[in-house]
Amino acid sequence: MNPLSSLLESLLKRNRTEYSEDVRKLINSLINEGDLHHGESWAAHMTPSLESPALLGQLLSGLHNGNLLSPELYPQLVKIEKQLIDWFCRLFEHNHAHFTHGSTYANLEALWQARELSQADSTIVYASQDAHYSVAKACHILGLQFKSIATNERGEISIEALRQACQQQSPLAIIATAGTSSCGAIDAISSCVALAEQFSCWCHIDAAWGGALMLTAKSYLLDGLKEADSISFDPHKALAQPRPCGVLLYQQPLKSISDIDYLAQAPKQTLLGSHGGEIFLPLWFSLLLSGEQKLAQQINHRLLQAKQFYSTLKSQTDWWLLSSPTGIVCFRPASHYDLSPLIEQGIFSTVTINDQLSYRAVFASDKTQAKALLAALEIYF
Ligand SMILES: Cc1ncc(COP(=O)(O)O)c(C=O)c1O
């Protein structure tokens, strides 16, 4: 029996809850549906198989249910939040951070702060054509002009095209992506930061997916990150955490939401409203019970599986392939095979690269095995 089913079963028994066979079937079918993410051949999206300590943290946050808009009522929760924020600030070498409900919100808030705080006399925001669509959406909400910049053959922003664009029209902000959603590419962060300095504009790094590398020996791939004005990162993508768990880091201080009397003074510098332990207690439990080293091992394991998947396809097929440093591999079989059955099973997803339909394997779960994905593809070799 799935461990979650047996936990649910015992909780319901303890509460002496009577429920019908139909309800039991419904619960079990939901549990089975979620089992997709625990399988060896799950590689469709950035949804990881969750760490068991994280599930405990989620349960505890439900029991606690405090709202940090009234921090004076929850000193223990405030203390834990602060411990984690300090941990993130050390990890990313930034001075300030707060939790978010994910990078859609973090990208919006970072651009909002860029608009409020930047000295630049411009409304233009540059990011690569592969930047997550939340960036264009945030610009639309904030009345800014989003301009996309071409990418190179690895899916990274073209620094030459970015420089030329800046020379033609000076920007309010430059956004670099560390781990694009489509193919996992990391933009040249140091060059983006240097251009932002040259043109006196804000530099935000969307590291929603790739920020996890900071926990590993591959953190050098994100060199330049500490000079950025702001960074978004989502433990709910690459650190085996349940949603919502995002973080937004700044180099310059913003007034913390917990320094503000919520009813007397509306918090003006963060988007975050009602929130409590649901955003960070799962991660706190993971760090407490598994430790930072285990999280790093899981990331390294996923990256190794991605590498094995890529090198086997490279040695055994003549397919078009694109690997990335963040654990996403894109591919296109030589002939026009229809891989839709594998898409429907959640094994792979599709993505358009250079106007061509391509397939994408996302190594987000430490349960995902290269050999299981290769076995599913073998008949097309
Ligand atoms: C690079 C990147 N940025 C931002 C986001 C938005 O994150 P969320 O959907 O958690 O808000 C995503 C989502 O996949 C992403 O891949």
Image (tube, rainbow, N blue to C red):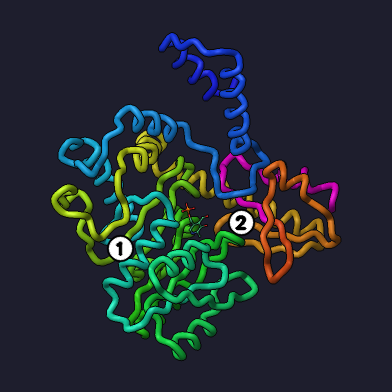
Quadrant location of the N terminus? top right
- Disc number placed over residue 250 in the picture, else none: 1
Left or right placement of residue 357 versus residue 181 in this view:
right
The answer to whether mark 2 and mark 1 are in CB contact below 8 A is no
At horizontal 61% and vertical 76% (from top left) the residue drawn is: 152
Q: Which residues are magenta?
A: 360-381
At horizontal 51% and vertical 48% (from top left) the residue drawn is: 299
- Does 367 appear in magenta? yes
Q: Is residue 271 visible?
A: yes
Q: Position of residue 247 (x, y in %)?
A: 36, 53
The residue to which callout 2 is attached is 328
The amino acid pointed to by label 1 is Tyr
Q: Position of residue 29 (x, y in %)?
A: 62, 26
Badge 1 element: strand
The one nearer the camera, 45 or 238, is 45
Give the tally of numbered discs: 2
In the displayed structure, would residue 76 be above or below residue 162? Answer: above
In the displayed structure, would residue 346 be above or below residue 185? Answer: above
At horizontal 48% and vertical 61% (from top left) the residue drawn is: 134
Q: Position of residue 193 (x, y in %)?
A: 39, 75
The one nearer the camera, 284 or 143, is 143
